[in-house]
Amino acid sequence: MSKKQHSMTIGALAKAAGMGVETIRYYQRRGLVAEPEKPYGSIRHYDDQALARLHFIRTAQWLGFSLDEIGGLLTLQDGTHCDEARVLGEQKLASVRAKISSLRRIERALDGLVQECCAQRGNVECPLITSLQDGLENSAFT
Amino acid sequence: MSKKQHSMTIGALAKAAGMGVETIRYYQRRGLVAEPEKPYGSIRHYDDQALARLHFIRTAQWLGFSLDEIGGLLTLQDGTHCDEARVLGEQKLASVRAKISSLRRIERALDGLVQECCAQRGNVECPLITSLQDGLENSAFT
DNA sequence: GTTACTCCCGTAGTCAGCTACGGAATCAAC
DNA sequence: GTTGATTCCGTAGCTGACTACGGGAGTAAC
């Protein structure tokens, strides 16, 4: 149970979290990470809890949450708001799924265009370009 | 074959293209859309070719091309650079596919967390939050 | 005790893609 | 011939997530 003694400067914290010092200071300004009060000397020290919070932020970002949304999640962090967290998770899941299906449509369209391009190689008319000009309406991939 | 007589002001063009006047003027500044010279009076007029170009831009944007990339595509527009266009299309297709697979991983992770949340309803510990804190490593969804 | 690094803090810049503002000119309708 | 909308043009602001800069203070190594 050694927790507090593992203290580090902001530079070490940044290295441990795999991000830049300026990024952490930016999160502090946004209110996502607390600034520990600095001792009588002058330099602030951070513990493992600060590191955990940075992990939280990074992971939630990877899941597609914005920093504002992460701020919301952090207020639920005491564990007593499971339902609210779940709702946020469900909303994010829905938006991720929407993004995926939109990207799939784009994939089909692009793939079709590239195939056509390959087939017509050497031709003067480029099917990719002309499809873009026509807004894809006349193409089979929409 | 009536083409030129279909001329419009920038406002009408914007409406036809489904975008704002300021957006078109922004594209002109970026060099994506030409500014027709204005007649002795004062107001510029745009034809269907300008509209086609806006369609081109919008569609290419939907396909995930940035405005810079679209500028590149537009220089290939004479149709004699089919191979180059195809290469750009293939690159974009690869990046779309990468995005999709990354989003799928995110989907799985989020879905797992939300399921756990549902299962543990009423519990004090929220699995979604704690997983975020631990960086998902200890969770089954990575 | 000096050199070299790191920290502190505020402010400002970056990127993409718009969006808004302001003041003058012009056009369309009545 | 006046009102009200639109155009023109340059410049400036916005969003999100950083990233950089500058100058002073503290800290670690030799």
Image (cartoon, coloured by chain):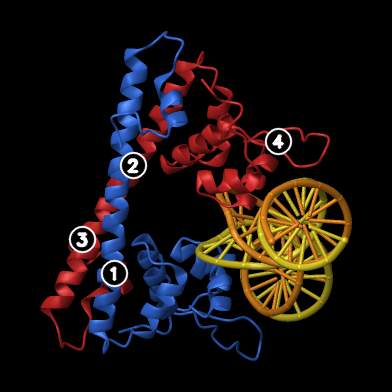
Chain colours: A blue, B red, C orange, D yellow
Q: What is the chain identity of the residue bearing mark 3?
A: B
Task: Assess disc 3: are there few (<14), some (14-19) or many (≥20) residues with their C-alpha within 10 Å of its C-alpha.
Answer: some
Q: Which is more foreground, mark 1 or mark 4?
A: 4
- Residue type highlighted by circle 2: Ala
Task: Assess disc 2: are there few (<14), some (14-19) or many (≥20) residues with their C-alpha within 10 Å of its C-alpha.
Answer: few
Report the Cα–Cα distance between label 1 and label 2.
23 Å
Q: What is the chain identity of the residue bearing mark 4?
A: B
- Residue type highlighted by circle 4: Glu
**Residue closer to the observer: A15 or A68:** A68
Q: Is residue B40 visible?
A: yes
Residue B98, which numbered label?
2
Residue A91, which numbered label?
1
Asked which secondary structure carries label 3, the reply is loop
Q: Which is more foreground, mark 3 or mark 4?
A: 4
- Residue type highlighted by circle 3: Phe
Q: Is residue B97 visible?
A: no
Report the Cα–Cα distance between label 1 and label 4.
44 Å
Identity of the residue furthest to the top in this view: A122
- Residue type highlighted by circle 1: Gln
Report the Cα–Cα distance between label 3 and label 2.
19 Å
Residue B141, which numbered label?
3
Residue appearing at x 61%, y 26% in the figure: B4
Q: Which is more foreground, mark 2 or mark 4?
A: 4
Across and down, in percent, residue A54 comes to: 43, 71
Asked which secondary structure carries label 2, the reply is helix
Same-chain status of marks 1 and 2: no
Give residue D15's quadrant in the image.
bottom right
Q: Which is more foreground, mark 3 or mark 2?
A: 2
Across and down, in percent, residue A55 comes to: 38, 69
Task: Assess disc 1: are there few (<14), some (14-19) or many (≥20) residues with their C-alpha within 10 Å of its C-alpha.
Answer: few
